[in-house]
Amino acid sequence: MRRDAAKHPSPNSGYPEATVAGALGVRLGGEKSYHGVVSFRAYMGDKTRELVPDDVTRTAKLMFWTANVTVIAGTAVWIAITGHWTWI
């Protein structure tokens, strides 16, 4: 992520894309076509294997578990700081 995130033209998309590429061991980027316009995006990650359709499911699971861990950790910090578990 640290190596590749800044390569993306969007400052917000580079971090998650580079993180997923590293976590899955794939290389993302290259030639893309958006509405018929071909462009090239810098490569992210190391190509240790080929992309497969199941990588979409793996990415969704990774996002799901990352979001859940973030909520749990945030709740734990909230409880530690405030001393109670309610948000109001």
Image (tube, rainbow, N blue to C red):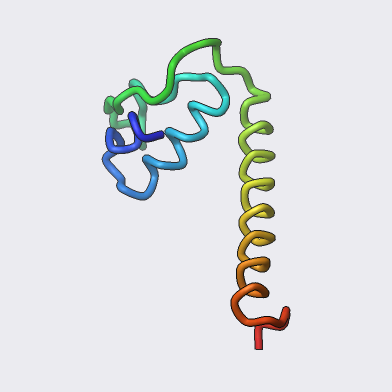
The vertical placement of 50 against 72, above or below, is: above
Name the residue rendered at 37%, 50% in the picture. Answer: 12
- The answer to whether residue 81 is left or right of residue 42 is right
Identify the residue at horizontal 34%, vertical 22% (top origin): 43
Q: Nearer the viewer, residue 59 or 39?
A: 59
Seen at 55% across and 28% down, the residue is 23
Residue 79 at x, y percent in the picture: 67, 74
Quadrant in the picture for residue 55: top right
Q: Quadrant of the N terminus?
A: top left
Residue 58: image location, x then y, percent: 66, 31
Total of numbered circles in the picture?
0
What residue is drawn where x is 28% and y is 37%?
A: 6
Relative depth, front residue between 4 and 85:
85
In the foreground, 42 or 25: 25
Q: Quadrant of residue 63?
A: top right
Q: Is residue 42 above or below residue 60?
A: above
Q: Quadrant of the C terminus?
A: bottom right
Is 48 located above or below residue 68 in the figure? above
Q: Would you identify the image quadrant in which residue 15 lies? A: top left
Residue 19 x/y as whole percent: 48, 35
- Nearest the viewer among 21 and 88 is 88
Residue 36 placement, left or right of 80 = left
Residue extending furthest right? 85
